[in-house]
């Protein structure tokens, strides 16, 4: 994948939109849709399996299905195309345009305190951007592209 393609999956803050549960072309969304299809009318069987298998975990199927359904339906085109659904206070999306950089590590103010992130995300933002700066964007992407972002 070249630099421009990678940008469709890596947000300016460095987070991997491609592995976000909401990403339109992401594994979590696509696999959830497949699992929903495979499960079909499992609701009825889940109830039966509580007794037949003496397995109380099946009684939680409605909750599982609700979340699976959510994962299947939610869709985001990624940070460079639309406002993030998760981090509503993010300032990076607008800020990187003003600073005319693709990623925060390319900005003269990095690491800044302007992100709007909570401490957990701020720490990840620093860690990811330092790694990209050290390795280069393409190599960083190779390193993380198949890993869970969670
Ligand atoms: S912009 Fe936010 S909600 Fe959308 S894919 Fe990226 S991290 Fe997920
Ligand atoms: S000022 Fe901060 S948030 Fe804005 S582009 Fe630079 S490093 Fe990123």
Image: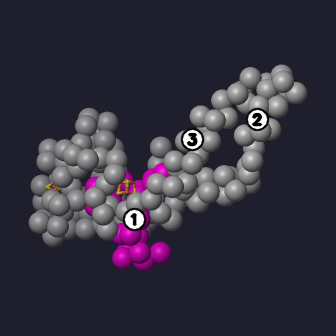
User: Mark 2 = which residue?
Assistant: 46
Which image quarter: residue 34? Answer: bottom right
The secondary structure making up most of the magenta span is loop
Nearer to us in this view, 94 or 129: 94
Secondary element at tag 2:
helix
Nearer the viewer's eye, disc 1 or disc 2?
A: 2
Nearer to us in this view, 125 or 23: 23
Nearer the viewer's eye, disc 1 or disc 3?
A: 3
CA separation in Å, label 2 and label 3? 14 Å
CA separation in Å, label 1 and label 2? 34 Å
**Other-residue count near label 3 (Cα within 10 Å), few / some / many at <14 / 14–19 / ≥20:** few
Is residue 111 visible to the viewer in this orientation of the structure? no
Nearer to us in this view, 96 or 29: 29
User: Mark 1 = which residue?
Assistant: 77
Could you tell me residue 147's position as x and y percent?
Answer: 53, 53
CA separation in Å, label 1 and label 3? 22 Å
The mark that comes first in sequence, 1 or 3, is 3
The image shows residue 9, relative to residue 1, as above or below, that is above
Residue at figure coordinates x 77%, y 31% from the top left: 47
Secondary element at tag 3:
helix
Could you tell me residue 1's position as x and y percent?
Answer: 47, 75
Ligand 1 within 8 angstroms of badge 1 C-beta: yes
Q: What stretch is highlighted in magenta?
A: 1-22
Any magenta on residue 25?
Answer: no
Is residue 77 visible to the viewer in this orientation of the structure? yes
User: Mark 3 = which residue?
Assistant: 66
Could you tell me residue 23's position as x and y percent?
Answer: 45, 59
Ligand 1 within 8 angstroms of badge 2 C-beta: no
Which image quarter: residue 124? Answer: top left
């Amino acid at each position: 994948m070249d630099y421009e393609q990678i940008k469709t999956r890596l947000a300016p803050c460095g987070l991997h939109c491609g592995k976000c549960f909401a990403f339109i072309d992401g594994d979590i969304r696509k696999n959830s849709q497949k699992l929903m299809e495979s499960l079909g009318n499992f609701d009825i069987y889940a109830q039966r399996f509580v007794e037949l298998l003496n397995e109380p975990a099946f009684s939680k199927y409605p909750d599982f299905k609700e979340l699976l359904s959510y994962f299947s339906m939610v869709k985001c085109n990624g940070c460079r195309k639309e406002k993030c659904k998760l981090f509503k206070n993010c300032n990076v999306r607008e800020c990187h345009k003003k600073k005319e950089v693709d990623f925060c590590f390319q900005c003269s103010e990095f690491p800044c305190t302007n992100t709007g992130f909570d401490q957990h995300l701020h720490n990840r933002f620093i860690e990811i951007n330092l790694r990209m700066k050290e390795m280069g964007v393409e190599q960083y992407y190779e390193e993380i592209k198949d890993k869970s972002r969670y």
